[in-house]
Image (tube, rainbow, N blue to C red):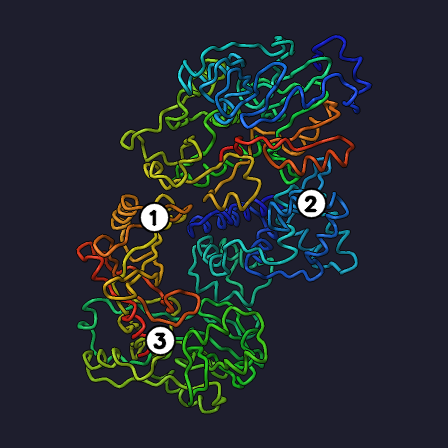
Amino acid sequence: MRNFADLLDRLVLTPSRNGKIRLLTDHFKAVPDPDRGYALAALTGGLDFPAVKPAMLRTLIGERMDEVLFAYSYDYVGDLAETISLVWPTTLEEETPPPLSEIVQTLSRLGRAEAPSVMAGLLDRLDPAARFALIKLATGGLRIGVSARLAKQALARFGDRDISEIEELWHGLEPPYETLFAWLEGKTQKPVSTAKALFRPVMLAHPVGDGELSKLDPADYVAEWKWDGIRVQAVCEDGVKRLYSRTGDDISGAFPDLLSSFEAEMTLDGELLVGKPDLRTGTFSDLQQRLNRKTVSKKMLGEYPVFLRCYDLLQAEGEDLRALPFIQRRAALQERISGLSQDRFDLSPLVDFTSWEDLDAKRRAPPHPVIEGVMLKRRDSSYVPGRPKGPWFKWKRDPFIIDAVLLYAQRGHGKRSSYYSDYTFGVWTGPEDAPELVPVGKAYFGFTDEELKQIDKYVRDNTIERFGPVRSVRAERDRGLVLEIAFEGLNRSTRHKSGVAMRFPRISRLRWDKPAAEADRLETLTSMLDS
Amino acid sequence: MLPEISPDKSDFRCLKNDLSSYLMKPQNLLQPRPAGLYCPPGDFYIDPVRPVERALITHGHADHARAGHGQVLATKQTLDIMALRYGTNFARSRQAISYGETLTLDGVGVSFHPAGHVLGSAQIAVEKSGLRIVASGDYKRHPDQTCAAFEPVRCDVFITEATFGLPVFVHPDPSQEIRRLTASLMQFPERAHILGAYSLGKAQRVIKLLRIAGYNTPILIHGALEKLCRYYEGQGIDLGELEPATVEKDLADRAAGRVIVAPPSVFGERWTRRFADPLNVFVSGWMRIRQRAKQRGVELPLILSDHADWNELIATIRETEAGEVWVTHGREEAIVRWCELNGIKARPLNLVGYEDEAE
């Protein structure tokens, strides 16, 4: 438990991805089975202990200390688990804390009636950091900034394997993952899973680079629209149905409408979208209503029905098609799609083109607003996990561009903590002769390290006011820094004064040369909304 | 072990829970005023926050020891530290007093006793007509190799600080905290570990603790720590090899894997850019609270404080056997509540001008 508590404490305060991966791999190296496996399960959301509830812990501490002193403490700390872990009365004798595996086993056998006395007994045996870890573990929701994906990346690093191998195995494994660790340490063969409807690691595309297409023969490729939803994988095997995100997270629970009408032995790769295939394809903000939910209400299902626009077929009737050329998989998909519910599944159409110039024109003027570009797939490409260079390309619609004026700068985090690296920018609004700047977005990347130093210096030299980590910067008609902002789309927003919210804004160029007065007006943005 | 100041003290012990029977009312011996805690019969202030004619200073931290008073009475070490910080003319006249020595100021007995807070720190006992009040200043009970250990003084009224006056603050064993630092140095050898530590007391204590733990590599120090570290060494406290953390070109590998000690205000400042991928280590009692660490961008919090934690505060209140407790700077309400629950009269003192630790 000591190791696990230390790991949590370090993870929660380590901002860098690589730092977190190092903490995880070191933990996997230093801690034996089955403790490391239970730590992995705790981090990836693989443990659930319904018998322990926060209210019960609140009662336990109320029996042990003055309510007023507890209230002062809770008020100061703000987090119930942390407060209880800190104020829990310490027993005098030094005890070796039980290992994580013992705690997990105790908790998993726990009934409602005995939960309070067992939890109290465990808390008595732990120090504050371990008590905090125990409470977070028992009540669920560690919230320490580690995604399941990051944990898998750490496993890949630990075993020097490709992450796709781990993703493919993942859903067939159970805590404490001893066979997985044994394989990653080179002690045994790769575990073989008998579980059904497993995730198949997804094939991804590179963006088209400058001048890259001139080296390629258009005849070798087919093109299809790139839809603006989320890429998913739907699997049905022996009646077991699963929907996975691109990174292999099981998101089945949030999409019962799609899965209940999925009646076929196959693995589909496609875009999850809101609407009805033949009537309406909803925007990404429609889809957002359905994302990041564990369960979904009837009302939600009615208002935002989802469907799958299919790109590829990886498996059919138990046969693995991934090694086949794309055009053969596509033909197999086309053949089978009509057998699926037409309300929930359709085929993403191919785009005819004769030359790259022809396709470029189509890419710039797509037939539907929810298209964000085109995909190029080599006719002979087999389905390879990861992001191989060459077989697939994405060629996105050009981003929108505006010139905005820097208004506020905020200190960054981690490596960038000594720099003002997060920028709020605005555009002009109001009468032409007395315009003012209204904030329209915030961006914190798109510039080089050298440019960051230049902006940081500019911010420090032109500060008007400081509010904690934020500085407001001089921004007037004749004095201000113009930033060229690239973004993918624009939504109406009632939360922002400007009435618009940008998708994926980033700084594409620093316009040291441009007078602030010549930056764009809000009308330029609102006209993009209407188109 | 408890120092007795006046031999007839014991005559009053039986009356300790009824201070109204004293000839002298406590609030007439010491009272809060805008400039600080004032003693009317002795005409002096303790740790005044603005210039006064006569000041008794508990310790050298800037919020307790200010420049510009007429006469200053303090321990030799506190006077030295004030001279280092403000120049030798920080007051018109200065008088040193030893621990345990008693002086009489206009009929008021005054004695200084170790507070265990920083080098030279003292509690001040003030006594008249058999009534004794101890103003403890800032204090701690955890062992500290860089200053004299706290000595409890029996008194009628104990004035306690309450910086960490909540049950959530229980400082762990310092050696356990130092182990977490040495582990991080091994785990992240490519990163410079910047320890944010208050320049008087905390900085020297954490350096000393590293040395005791067997860390023998030269430690880099920020310029703001230079004079105070040298002073501590002059007082016989061996801090091992210290090097200035000055210019970039002098730093091999941009101090990767090294320990740099600096005031906490450097976190996120341009000064840190000279170091390899700085890892912020904040050395403070506040680090008990995760959100505090997170807000400051601290990656490795070390819970180490020069102030008493909750257990030390309540143990000390008991040991002084005071019938009444006045609580100042910090979370007064929780200490007052604890005193009420334990049958000790208590009230907050509402002194202004003292800061939280290292903030």
Whole-angstrom CA distance, mark 1 to mark 2, is 39 Å
The mark that comes first in sequence, 1 or 2, is: 2
The structure residue drawn at horizontal position 71% and vertical position 54%, both measured from the top left corner, is A106
The structure residue drawn at horizontal position 35% and vertical position 62%, both measured from the top left corner, is A441
The mark that comes first in sequence, 3 or 1, is: 3
| For the residues bearing labels 3 and 1, Cβ distance under 8 angstroms | no
Q: Which mark is residue A382?
A: 3
Report the amino acid beneath label 3.
Ser
> Label 3: how many residues lie within 10 Å, few (<14), some (14-19) or many (20+)?
many
Disc 1 marks which residue? A420
Q: Nearer the viewer, residue B321 or A486?
A: B321
Q: Is residue A48 above or below residue A23?
A: below
Q: Nearer the viewer, mark 2 or mark 3?
A: 2
Q: Nearer the viewer, mark 3 or mark 1?
A: 1
The answer to whether any part of residue A131 appears in the image is no
Report the amino acid beneath label 1.
Tyr
> Label 1: how many residues lie within 10 Å, few (<14), some (14-19) or many (20+)?
many
- Please identify the quarter of the rendering in which residue B15 is found: top right
Disc 2 marks which residue? A70
Please identify the quadrant where the N terminus of chain B is shown: top right
Residue A37 x/y as whole percent: 58, 55
Whole-angstrom CA distance, mark 3 to mark 1, is 46 Å
Q: Is residue A225 above or below residue A104?
A: below
| Label 1 secondary element | strand
Residue B86 located left or right of residue A112: left
